Image (cartoon, rainbow, N blue to C red):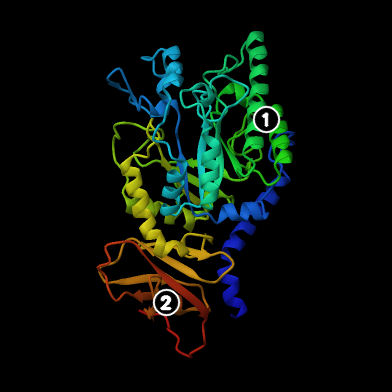
Amino acid sequence: MKRNVRTFLCMSIFTCCVFSAQQADAQAQQIELKHGSHRIGKRTDAVMQKWRGYGLGQFIHWGLYAIPGGEWNGKQYNGAAEWIRSWNGIPKSTYDSLIYKFNPVNFNAEEWAVTAKQMGARYVTITTKHHDGFCLWPSKYTRYTIANSPWKKDIMKPLVDAYDKQGIDVILYFSVMDWNHPGWRYDIKTKEDSIAFEGFKQFTRNQLLELLTLYPTAKGLWFDGTWDKSWIKQAAFADELETEMRKFRPGLIIGSRFRADENGKRHFDSNGVLMGDYEQGWERKIPNKIEDVHGNDWDCVMTVPENQWGYNKAWKGHIKTRNELLEMTAKCVSLGGNFVLNFGPQGDGAIRKEEKQLAAQIGDWMKTNSEAIYNCEYAGLEKQDWGYFTKKTGSDKLYMIVFNVPVSGALKVKLPANTSIGKSYLLAQPAQLLNAEEISGTEYFIHLKNTAAGNPFVVVLEPTAKKASGNTYDKAKT
């Protein structure tokens, strides 16, 4: 293919270079930081390149909070189910005693992993410990673990093994905030607070290194509960701990919410540079344009109801449909990110039927169309109302993921100068070529043969260098 075509189709690279140049210009005015970001720009190693191409992932929120399921003594907790211990109507010691009721007789790690595989997930983030402090692994640094429940057996090892077996990479969720530990503080205001929190810091370090030791195939750590002043003030300690963990596990992936810099800035340091390997700020929301992600890696984690992560007996509000979730997936990938869908298994270990149905529905679509999701990136093309563009990484191939078919049945595409459409076809029917009509020098209509699709579908574009035809359009004159 001629040079001018390749130049355009590498616009995503150019965009990243622009962001890098902007960052370089900003360096002249940077604040000197000891505990800010230690890298400018994206990681280029194979581990992170694989992460970048996942496209679709699964999130698992599971713990003691799945037993009450958002309900306590007949009263519904009007909040995320995994936060029910913070409800004023619940004695903390009573909640903590749920450890003696945790016996998930219907837990099946292989079934969970197969469900994720059928959905098309390429990675999974699993809660090892949420804010309540209950550990799903037999940690030797606390008694508040699975080992002291009626279940007794490690939960994390069979999960990691099962997902590994299905070829799904595992990320370990870890809440720094720990309501069960006596040393945890929301802020440090007294000498006693400081002494107690020093013990908590060592406890946290011990548990994290323990997880990395016990589950060596896990690819990364997903941190939560790091927004309180007590942890934000630990810039030096958290920075040293991150360095220690990366040395302990080369290639470890850590998101942007683990630590703050010495000025209390989280996600982005005081110079505006991302801290961590990818941005974790897109929780239950998606950017609208490529400029919003500032050239960084990122993913979006999303619930099916409006804000329910852990199991809730009563899903409230709007429940997202398959097509909504597929459109979110397409939008994320079109902007260079990954989409991660949350599941909240029941207290007995079974995945609720609604989530299994959604996984199967998404998986049915992915069987045909995953080529437009996996290992794809920002295409550098102007978005049109019918849906989203993605581009195969390392290739010129473009994908149109269509959700809204115009009544005309013609999908508008705007290409750069000196580029035309060599071939266009449905991903599901590659042998049936579609007519690409040139409207002007840069715009085309892709004419569909059947406008009553009813389901989102993918059109493949194979661009080529535009041949000079001698036919030019002069602007209309009044």
Residue at x-position 38% and y-position 15%: 90
Q: Is residue 375 left or right of residue 203?
A: left
The residue sitting at 51% across, 71% down in the picture is 397
The CA distance from mark 2 to mark 1 is 51 Å
Who is closer to the viewer here, 442 or 127? 127
Helix, strand or loop at mark 2: strand
Q: Where on the picture, by quarter, is residue 393?
A: bottom right
Near-viewer residue (220 or 190) = 220
381 in relation to 339, above or below? below
Q: Residues within 10 Å of mark 2 (few under 14, many from 20)?
A: many
Amino acid carrying label 1: it is Ala
Could you tell me the amino acid type at mark 2?
Ser
Answer few, some or many: residues within 10 Å of disc 1's Cα (few below 14, many 20 plus, some between 14 and 19): many
Instruction: Name the residue tied to disc 2.
Output: 424
Residue 33 screen position, x and y as percent: 73, 35
Q: Label 1, on which residue?
A: 238
